[in-house]
Amino acid sequence: MDTVSERITSLQNPRVKQLVKLRDRGARDAAGLFLIEGYREVKRALAAGVKPVEFYCGPEWYLGENEPALVAEARQAGAQVFELSKAVFAKASYRDRPDGLLAVAPQWKRALADLAPRTPPFLLVVEAIEKPGNLGTILRSADAAGVNAVIVCDPVTDIFNPNVVRSSTGVLFSMPVVVAPSAEVRAWLRAHGVRTVATTPAAKMLYTQADLRGPLALVMGSEQYGLSEFWLKGCDELVRIAMAGQADSLNVAMAAMIVLFEAVRQRSLKL
Amino acid sequence: MDTVSERITSLQNPRVKQLVKLRDRGARDAAGLFLIEGYREVKRALAAGVKPVEFYCGPEWYLGENEPALVAEARQAGAQVFELSKAVFAKASYRDRPDGLLAVAPQWKRALADLAPRTPPFLLVVEAIEKPGNLGTILRSADAAGVNAVIVCDPVTDIFNPNVVRSSTGVLFSMPVVVAPSAEVRAWLRAHGVRTVATTPAAKMLYTQADLRGPLALVMGSEQYGLSEFWLKGCDELVRIAMAGQADSLNVAMAAMIVLFEAVRQRSLKL
């Protein structure tokens, strides 16, 4: 295979150490890179136009027949390819069950000014989300609901966390995601005439009673603290989800999905 | 502490080996027991009337101050209490970050005949769910939506899997859950005049267009194969969720939540 630049069999290889470091935000931000692991994730990244700079394969971990084609595709996209021995790949992998495919790609940054929402805009704003799994699930829901873009305010987890990549099932690569401070986001939404509807247990109005048509940004708070005063006081409408059962039966990702799909329902109604 | 029957410091202790075995379904079913790990889970189990037979504590793992009170509560409920050294508790625990609390409780079995649904009944039927995390999340959603009972047909994962216990955040203890074969369930639903509405991508009707009021059982299929022919042909109505984005952006737990909350919306409307 002349697609391979180098074979790595030492656990002490500096490239392997760097792969392990990229699991941490500090190293990711310093390098401006992030990890994409797994067949499905890598395939979707390439399909979305992501250009990995490095590609690590561990053929002894392959689960199927299509892996070499994907490696070739990554190489064509410009990646330098490294082949790892079984033990070395196991060290590089952050998965319980590696499938022998791990890419390193440059991070990107989208600004509010880059957004070109459809008319009327349908946006999701999330504030200070802590758990990468929740952020990934929120991206999936937003994708399924046909949201134009997700705006992440003051994030606690960065969007390039390996568990965001994984739990978003690749939506991170196709969905426009903007990271920006809350104040800037609210100013942008107002300047663009987008109505803001925030979900909070303290609201009086049910989410099903609010008008979720027209230019809309749904706003969701963090897992532990909910929305900040900034958003609670600065949104056009506050709504709540009527809940039976335990107080914590809905997490932020589930709540986002419920309100998103009510908006989809209302927006599809004939006027 | 005279609440402790025995202190265990050996990793080879047969009780510890049995705890590890109880992670596997075969051992769980053979013993008729299951594991409840973690402060929140144990607390909710006790609150719901679950009576652990054994209780294992690892004080060196405690995160707070309230653990001894919970141990005392478990003992009052009839549990034999064992104190484990740090290393032994780490072996017994199935969590990444143990908090020093692990109970063993008898499994229970509810039959369809035990169900006393409210009028009109609002039920959720799930078929052949494979992933414990999905089943747990489905239980949470059902709880939040105020479903009377969840009926699990032909399960691939058993409801006492540690990850069902965990991902249900204790709803397993409070929500009536019946496990039964599909044919028996459908006959029971028909005998009780309960309308069945199944979600499948093959349906023509949108879930928002169906009437989800009155005596209702929502029916959801497995992650990988969807609903079986038995249910697809044997339901009163088939509905689908309109989806933008990637084909797999919604998993079965997310789809269940969306349809459950549309039913909640419709059922709360004034007629």
Image (cartoon, coloured by chain):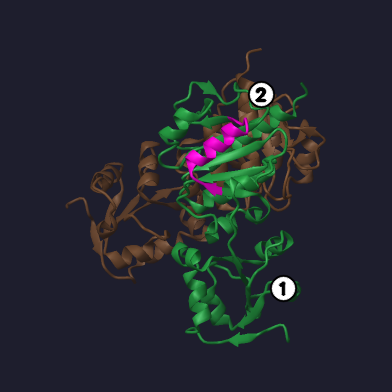
Chain colours: A green, B brown
Q: Is residue B148 visible?
A: no
Q: Where B234 falls versus B121 (above or below)?
A: below
Q: Is residue A189 magenta?
A: yes
Q: Choose between A114 and B254: the one closer to the eye.
A: A114
Residue placed farthest to the top in the image?
B271
Assign a secondary structure to mark 2: loop
Mark 2, chain letter?
B
Coordinates of residue B133 in the picture (x, y in percent) = 55, 51
Stretch of the chain drawn in magenta: A179-195
Residue denoted by label 2? B215
Q: Are marks 2 and 1 on the same chain?
A: no
At a point 62% along the width and 42% down the height, the residue shown is B254
Quadrant in which residue A69 is drawn: bottom right
Mark 1, chain letter?
A
Residue A146 is left or right of residue A92, and the answer is right
Q: Is residue B3 magenta?
A: no
Coordinates of residue A216 in the picture (x, y in percent) = 63, 32
Q: Where B238 falls versus A16 (above or below)?
A: above
Q: Choose between B166 and B178: the one closer to the eye.
A: B166
Q: Tag on residue A67?
A: 1
At a point 53% along the width and 52% down the height, the residue shown is A133
Which quadrant would the N terminus of chain A be assigned to in this image? bottom right
> Disc 2 versus disc 1: distance between alpha carbons?
50 Å
